[in-house]
């Protein structure tokens, strides 16, 4: 059980820790930003630009989460201070303090990792795919073990999972599985899991109980919901009208009914002269322009996702992590050199040590 000396030292260390986190969070500026965004969101014209409004709400919610989490950590330290004082008369309070410290450590671990995450898509939900490699039944079993590991990780961190595709092996295990992981920073926390995962163990499927090495690949992709609401502001377009051209005769409209619209931010130009009136041609132009802007945005996002996932790096022989069950117990991440002998804990979803070290290494670059 925790003793009073250890509790006192923990309190001293964590008060300094929270002071440093307060600086990283830029606490006072964050409070001001929240106040400013709340004021903006209450304006009557706030929802006129739907896309901008959604981005503002997302930013506001993220800042609130950071501030609320930090304040909650401070309250937990205050509770531990009280328990420390009570422990002078009643040592049983140290049991409650021990439980509170474990909860505090889980929260601050998660909080620090998410403070590191700054990419635009880190907050998004994600798609996590696992594909078995060469190695027959052994590889299919390894794929199912990884699937269970990520399910348990998601459960520990209160992420929800939806199975999108599940392909069973012929005799055992899984050929491949694709899951949607939902929750704040799901992609940011799991993006470092993309790559090849290697297993070394005595195969239960080998009658000679020989040692086998097998592989499975993991791909994590940020999920972008298709809710792009394309709104075109009047000040962002230039409308030109001109005579329709044609083969001649009555079919040619001699009035300025043809319309050309130039979207200034993207330089997209759309022309329409098929309709009989200028109003109809303008409406058609705007529909086409919206479609082109929508498609451009999708292509930009797809390109960003391709750069983030970089599938070319997920090749067998370029493993990111090795899970050794025999002749000794060890899980080692080859990118950060982080390792642990607690193999079963890792397989039960305790990936925190690897995810944290990966994010910190990426953040230092």
Image (tube, grey):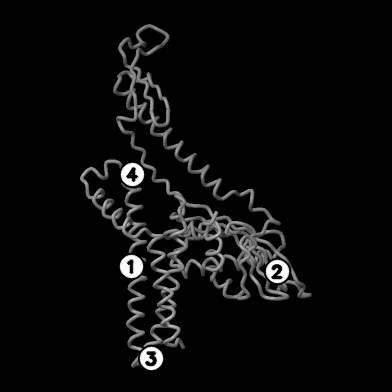
Q: Is there a contact, CB below 8 Å, between mark 1 and mark 4? A: no
The residue under label 2 is: 200
Q: Nearer the viewer, residue 109 or 324?
A: 109
The vertical placement of 41 against 323, above or below, is above
Q: Is there a contact, CB below 8 Å, between mark 3 and mark 1? A: no
Q: CA distance from mark 2 to mark 4?
A: 50 Å
Q: Of the two numbered discs 2 and 1 on the same chain, state the one appearing first in sequence.
A: 1
Comparing marks 2 and 4, which lies closer to the viewer?
Answer: 4
Q: Nearer the viewer, residue 97 or 355?
A: 97
Q: Position of residue 259 (x, y in %)?
A: 35, 20
Disc number placed over residue 71 in the picture, else none: 1
Q: Secondary structure at mark 3?
A: loop
Q: Nearer the viewer, residue 226 or 305?
A: 305
* Residue positioned 58% across, 71% down in the render: 346
Q: CA distance from mark 1 to mark 4?
A: 29 Å
Q: Secondary structure at mark 2?
A: strand
Disc number placed over residue 52 in the picture, else none: 4
Q: Position of residue 250 (x, y in %)?
A: 35, 8
Quarter assignment of residue 337: bottom right
Q: Of the two numbered discs 3 and 1 on the same chain, state the one appearing first in sequence.
A: 1
Q: Residue furthest left?
A: 44
Q: Secondary structure at mark 1?
A: helix
**Side of 62 where 198 appears, left or right:** right
Q: Of the two numbered discs 1 and 4 on the same chain, state the one appearing first in sequence.
A: 4
> Within 10 angstroms of label 2, few (less than 14), some, or many (20 or more) residues?
some
Comparing marks 1 and 4, which lies closer to the viewer?
Answer: 1
Q: Nearer the viewer, residue 178 or 128?
A: 128
Disc number placed over residue 92 in the picture, else none: 3
Q: Is there a contact, CB below 8 Å, between mark 2 and mark 4? A: no
Q: Of the two numbered discs 2 and 3 on the same chain, state the one appearing first in sequence.
A: 3
Q: CA distance from mark 3 to mark 1?
A: 27 Å
> Within 10 angstroms of label 3, few (less than 14), some, or many (20 or more) residues?
few
């Amino acid at each position: 059980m925790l003793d009073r000396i250890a509790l006192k030292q923990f309190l001293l260390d964590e008060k300094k820790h929270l002071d440093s986190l307060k600086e990283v969070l830029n606490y006072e500026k964050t409070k001001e930003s929240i106040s400013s965004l709340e004021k903006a969101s209450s304006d009557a014209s706030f929802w006129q630009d739907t896309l901008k409004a959604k981005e503002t709400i997302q930013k506001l919610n993220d800042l609130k989460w950071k501030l609320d989490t930090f304040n909650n950590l401070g309250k937990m330290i205050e509770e531990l201070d009280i328990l420390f004082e009570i422990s002078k008369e009643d040592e049983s309070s140290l049991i409650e303090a021990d439980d509170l410290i474990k909860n505090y450590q889980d929260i601050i671990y998660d909080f620090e990792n998410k403070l590191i995450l700054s990419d635009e898509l880190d907050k998004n939900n994600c798609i996590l795919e696992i594909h078995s490699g060469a190695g027959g039944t052994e590889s299919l079993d390894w794929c199912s073990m990884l699937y269970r590991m990520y399910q348990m990780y998601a459960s520990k961190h209160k992420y929800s999972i939806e199975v999108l595709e599940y392909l069973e092996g012929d005799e055992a295990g899984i050929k491949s599985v694709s899951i949607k992981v939902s929750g704040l920073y799901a992609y940011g926390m799991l993006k470092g899991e993309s790559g090849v995962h290697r297993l070394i163990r005595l195969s239960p499927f080998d009658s000679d109980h020989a040692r086998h090495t097998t592989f499975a690949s993991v791909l994590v992709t940020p999920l972008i919901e298709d809710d792009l609401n394309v709104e075109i502001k009047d000040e962002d377009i230039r409308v030109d009208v001109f005579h329709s051209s044609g083969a001649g005769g009555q079919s040619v409209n001699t009035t300025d009914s043809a319309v050309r619209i130039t979207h200034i931010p993207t330089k997209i130009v759309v022309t329409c002269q098929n309709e009989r009136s200028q109003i109809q041609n303008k409406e058609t132009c705007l529909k086409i322009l919206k479609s082109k802007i929508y498609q451009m945005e999708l292509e930009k996002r797809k390109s960003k996702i391709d750069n983030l996932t970089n599938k070319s790096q997920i090749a067998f022989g370029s493993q990111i992590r090795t899970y050794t069950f025999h002749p000794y117990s060890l899980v080692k991440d080859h990118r950060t050199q982080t390792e642990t002998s607690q193999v079963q804990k890792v397989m039960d979803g305790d990936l925190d040590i690897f995810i944290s070290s990966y994010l910190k290494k990426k953040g230092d670059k």
